[in-house]
Structures are given as C-alpha cells and as structure tokens.
C-alpha cells in the first residue's frame, strides 16, 4: 500500500491555529489527511518558540497534565504522572511492518503493512474528538549535518509536545531544514483510551512512517526517540551506508591534553548513562583527566571522506532513569535535571520537590507516591516507579562537550560493548579485529535477576544493545556492520567491558562508577599505541602493570581475578550462544559463525 493511499481525505480540518510559515504543501496535505481521520476539535501548529512553550506549559498545568514543582528549589521543573498501565516501552506491542516477514527478521514482531494500516485506521478513527491535534515538526541531528532527518509528529498529548521540545530541535528549525521537500518521517500518535489491549507502535520503514496508538509513555510516544532514531534510523542507515546505534558518545581528555572520542553500547541497567557522564576520581582529575559528554543514548555514525568513522548525537535532551541517580553515582545528571526538567512518575514531597529511591536525601517521613497516593517508609511499596524518568536539555549537563552540536560529529577511535555478567566475561578485553569485535557485540548480553525472571544468572542476549531497536532483519544488520570495514581506514578498535564481575562471595571485583576511567585509560593507550597487550583466546588483555590501580583498595591479585579466563565456563558460554544462531538461521553472516568456531578452537 502506498503512503498517499493510506488516508482518504474527504473533508477539511475543523479548526486550526494560524499555520506558521515553513510548513510546505506536502506537510499541510498530510496533516489535513490525518485530521480527517482523527477528527480533532482543533489543530495547533507548533513553531517551537519560547512563548509557545510557556503557554503550553501553563495549559498542561491547568489541566493537571503537569504538576508544578517548587520553583525556588527546582526552577522550571514539573511532574507528570502516567497511567499506571503505561509506564514503559511495550516490546510485544511494537511492530516492524515490511512487505515480507523475512525483511523484519525473526527477532522483531512483524505485521504486513496493509493489515497494520487497516487495523490502525480503526483505532485512530475519531480518536481525537474533544482533543487538540498538535503538529510538531522536529529535527533529529544537527542543521546542515549529512545525517540530519526531519520528522513531523501529530499528537493529542501535551506531555509529548513539551517533551519533544526538550528531546529534539523542534519547530521552525526543522521546517527550515525540510524546505519544500517531501522527505520527512510521518509520525502519527494518539494516547487513545490508553488500553493495553489496544496499544500498537508500528514502524513502516519503506514508507518512512510511524504510527503509535494507545500509549503516552516516552519510548512509545516520543516518536523521534527510539522509533525514528533507531528503528527507522537503522533501516535508513542500512540503505544509505551509515549506522544508527543505541550508543553513548563521550570524549576523554588525558593529561597530555589529547581528547579521544569513543562510543559505547550497553543493555539496560548496565551503566551507560553513568559512563557517558562519568566524573573522574579526584586523583585522576588532579592529573588533568576530563570527561565530556556528547550523547548518552543514541549515536549516528558515518564514514567521512578520509575513511574515518564519525559520530553525532541526533537528540537535544536526556530521557534518563531517575532511581539510583544521586551525586555519588552521577553528579552531572543531577545538575542536568536540576532545572527546566520534566519528571515522570517520581514521588512528591510536601515542600513541592521531587524524591526517589536512591536520592541523596533519605526517605521523607511522608510524601505522595508516583500514583498520587499518600506514602510513608512503612507503606510496603516504593514511592517512585522503577522506570521513572527525567527529561532535560543536554546543554544543562556541566560536562557537555563543546563539539556536541558540531554537524560533522567527532572522530571515533574506540567502540565499547558491555553487559552485566557476574562470571565468565572479564573486566576488559580488546577484539583482535573489526570482525571479531562485531562478534563480541553480537553475542553481548546481561544476566537476569530473580525479580525479573524468577531465575538468576540467565543470560538475555541483546546484540549490540539493539535487539528491541533494530528496524529490519538482524542478520542483515550484522552483515551491514561487517561491510563497513571495507570503507574504514583504519577502523576503530573494539572492546568489551564488564563492570559487574563478582567473587565467590558475590561482591563486585571492580569498584565501578568514576573508577571506570582507569579502564578507559588503558583503552585510550591501546588506541594510541602506547601500551602492549597479552594475547589470550578471547582477545587482547591488559598487562597488569598497565592498569592504573593507584589509590584503589583492590590489589593486583583482585584485578587479575576480574580478568581470569575459565575455559570451561567459556565453552558453556559458546553453547548458550546457540539460541541466537539458530534463531537467525541462514541470515547469520558466515563471518560471525567462523569467529565462533575460531574462539572454540582457541579454547
């Protein structure tokens, strides 16, 4: 089904605000078609101005969509409470709608485009009666960037409008980048009745279209986030020769004054945001070490005319997890969310400030929990939802890189993969080459907890942290990664880290947090040829004397325990990888199959 056949425009919009200059005929016609389907009472065309944001914020507060927080302690900050049935991404409701099931691959939920459009038209028909349709033009990437992508999201949620204003470059800047072209991602969203049984997040890669119905949660409703940046983005990257990745981007400046840029992919709960905003330990800061954040979640990477891999962050804001964030774990995040932020599903203290489990301050004697109910420490439940979030502008991060807004991105010297593994995986290992590195990324994963699965130590594979976000066949995605090497001169080095290895008593062998800079130091030394490494069956590993342990309470023996290779455990590790290989079947590139056989032979 062609995109222009999707809607049957038989009437015009009921009422509309003045259409700002810049909305071209393609955009106007598409908005009219969608308004005919959704039947909003009015249409508001967003221009992204500060005045508009102030007025929409006032409206959201008057409708109790937002709750104003203490403006003295938390200036510009507001609280939003979700429907209790709508607090996270819903992977089982997320679909890749391609002409063939094989194009989506066995790791994605698939729906035929014609079937999906027919079903969704039934959901969206009249869904905005009594509501306003907001027309939100947004830009992912930087103006003038070779990877800049424009989207227009139509939504009936003020929370989405205000959040998109933080997370993206929203308004006239996007329209100026679009010009008179038709090449924008068409994003249609409605909270609908917020019924979990009528919740669909559907991606149509060939149409450059996203339709999301029945959810107001950020990952399902902020359609520039995972939907465009990763699912549609990864498909476009495959077609156009670049990579859209679930990765942080950071700059590490050493005492020589040299800044090296790295990216990193980590599954959920593996410390990606904390690493992106890492604060150097005092001893290393005194020596001149410095961290600069370019992005904490998404990296778009392309090969420049010199064969160098360059990365940029297409977002303009952070959508971070709140619980556990404090001045010890992530002081830069605390500063970033201190003002002009939207908090979602945190607790509200009597003084009008936000609180969450893991906050710097102890639990209040009483407060209002994330559902709006009274709460005390004896309530027997958490005051804050485990997936509660903050949305804040990236420019409020005190460690933001001065190059974060450079449209050409930054040159990448290292790619880091990581997972949460109590055993087997060492603290750090370097891949032998690009193909071996792609294999390490393809096999990465994290162990589940008892709370999550009923069993501990069960490894959930999350290839390159992209399992929920790859917008096409993952076997083809791996092949695309492998093909990039041909154009790279030279390719970045690839590493795998594991901050979570434990001893026989279940205690972490490595302190983590800011001390992870010591491992980054070795990674940088390897990138610049300053240290040698030991060849092992699984990759290059540090010589113990090349890891800076000065001032740490752990000794060389404990570090070597964190690096130990248990060959029998590794053989079992290889056997557990079989599930993914079998699932992808003939789509798995033969190069990765060969890497697995090579590793088995080295063991």
Image (tube, helix red, strand yellow):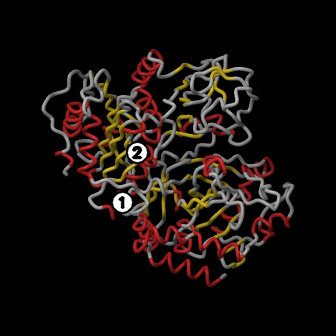
Mark 2 lies on a secondary structure that is strand
| Residue 385 place in picture, x, y as percent | 60, 34
Where 164 sits versus 547, above or below? Answer: above
Residue nearer the viewer, 453 or 156 = 453
Task: Identify the residue at the far top of this view.
Answer: 62
In the rendered image, which quarter is residue 159 located in? Answer: top left
| Residue 162 place in picture, x, y as percent | 44, 29
In the rendered image, which quarter is residue 146 located in? Answer: bottom left
Which of discs 1 and 2 lies nearer the camera? The answer is 1
Task: Identify the residue at the far front of this view.
Answer: 454
Where 154 sits versus 14, above or below? Answer: below
Q: Write the residue at 30% across / 50% down.
A: 208
Left or right of residue 90, residue 182 in this image: left
Residue that carries the numbered disc 1 in the rendered image: 104
Left or right of residue 244, residue 43 in this image: left
Residue that carries the numbered disc 2 in the rendered image: 140
Where 306 sits versus 400, above or below? Answer: below
Q: Residues within 10 Å of mark 2 (few under 14, many from 20)?
A: many
Image quadrant where one finds the C terminus: bottom right
- Mark sitting earlier along the chain (1/2): 1
Residue nearer the viewer, 256 or 359 = 359
Residue nearer the viewer, 537 or 529 = 537
Q: Which mark is residue 432?
A: none
Q: Are marks 1 and 2 in contact (CB under 8 Å)?
A: no
């Amino acid at each position: 089904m062609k995109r222009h056949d999707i809607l049957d425009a038989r009437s015009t919009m009921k009422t509309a605000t003045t259409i700002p200059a810049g909305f071209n005929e393609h955009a106007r016609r598409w908005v009219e078609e969608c308004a005919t389907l959704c039947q909003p009472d009015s249409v508001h065309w967003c221009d992204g101005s500060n005045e508009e944001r102030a007025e929409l914020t006032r409206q959201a507060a008057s409708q109790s969509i937002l709750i104003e927080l203490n403006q003295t302690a938390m200036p510009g900050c507001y609280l939003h409470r979700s429907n209790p049935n709508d607090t996270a991404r819903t992977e089982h409701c997320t679909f890749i709608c391609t002409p063939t099931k094989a194009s989506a691959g066995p790791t994605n939920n698939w729906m035929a485009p014609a079937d999906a459009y027919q079903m969704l038209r039934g959901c969206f028909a009249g869904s905005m009666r009594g509501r306003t349709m907001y027309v939100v033009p947004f830009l992912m990437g930087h103006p003038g960037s070779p990877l800049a992508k424009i989207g227009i999201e139509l939504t009936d949620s003020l929370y989405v409008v205000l959040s998109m204003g933080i997370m993206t470059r929203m308004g006239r800047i996007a329209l100026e980048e679009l010009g008179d072209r038709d090449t924008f991602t068409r994003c249609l969203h409605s909270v609908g009745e917020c019924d979990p049984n009528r919740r669909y997040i559907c991606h149509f890669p060939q149409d450059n279209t996203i339709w999301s119905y029945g959810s107001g949660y950020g990952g399902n409703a902020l359609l520039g986030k995972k939907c465009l940046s990763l699912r549609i983005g990864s498909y476009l990257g495959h077609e156009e020769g670049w990579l859209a990745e679930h990765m942080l981007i950071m700059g590490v400046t050493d005492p020589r004054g040299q800044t090296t840029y790295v990216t990193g992919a980590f599954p959920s709960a593996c410390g990606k945001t904390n690493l992106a905003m890492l604060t150097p330990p005092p001893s290393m800061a005194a020596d001149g070490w410095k961290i600069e954040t370019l992005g904490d979640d998404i990296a778009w990477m392309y090969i420049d005319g010199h064969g160098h891999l360059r990365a940029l962050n297409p977002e303009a804001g952070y959508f971070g997890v709140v619980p556990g964030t404090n001045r010890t774990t992530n002081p830069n995040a605390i500063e970033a969310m201190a003002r002009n932020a939207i908090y979602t599903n945190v607790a509200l203290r009597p003084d009008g400030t936000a609180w969450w489990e893991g906050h710097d301050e102890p639990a209040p004697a009483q407060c209002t929990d994330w559902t709006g109910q009274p709460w005390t420490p004896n309530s027997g439940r958490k005051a804050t939802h485990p997936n509660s979030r903050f949305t804040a502008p990236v420019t409020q991060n005190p460690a933001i890189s001065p190059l974060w807004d450079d449209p050409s991105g930054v040159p990448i010297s290292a790619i880091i993969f990581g997972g949460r593994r109590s055993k087997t995986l060492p603290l750090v290992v370097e891949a032998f080459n690009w193909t071996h590195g792609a294999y390490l990324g393809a096999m990465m994963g994290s162990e589940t907890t008892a709370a999550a699965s009923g069993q501990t130590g069960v490894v959930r594979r999350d290839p390159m942290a992209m399992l929920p976000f790859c917008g096409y066949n993952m076997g083809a995605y791996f092949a695309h990664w492998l093909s990039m090497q041909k154009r790279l001169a030279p390719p970045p080095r690839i590493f795998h880290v594991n901050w979570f290895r434990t001893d026989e008593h279940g205690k972490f062998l490595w302190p983590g947090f800011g001390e992870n800079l010591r491992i980054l130091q070795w990674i940088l030394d390897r990138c610049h040829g300053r240290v040698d490494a030991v060849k092992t069956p699984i990759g290059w590993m540090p010589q113990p004397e090349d890891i800076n342990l000065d001032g740490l309470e752990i000794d060389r023996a404990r570090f070597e325990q964190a690096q130990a290779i248990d060959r029998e455990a590794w053989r079992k590790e290889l056997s557990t990888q079989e599930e993914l290989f079998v699932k992808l079947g003939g789509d798995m590139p033969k190069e990765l199959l060969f890497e697995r056989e090579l590793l088995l032979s080295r063991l």
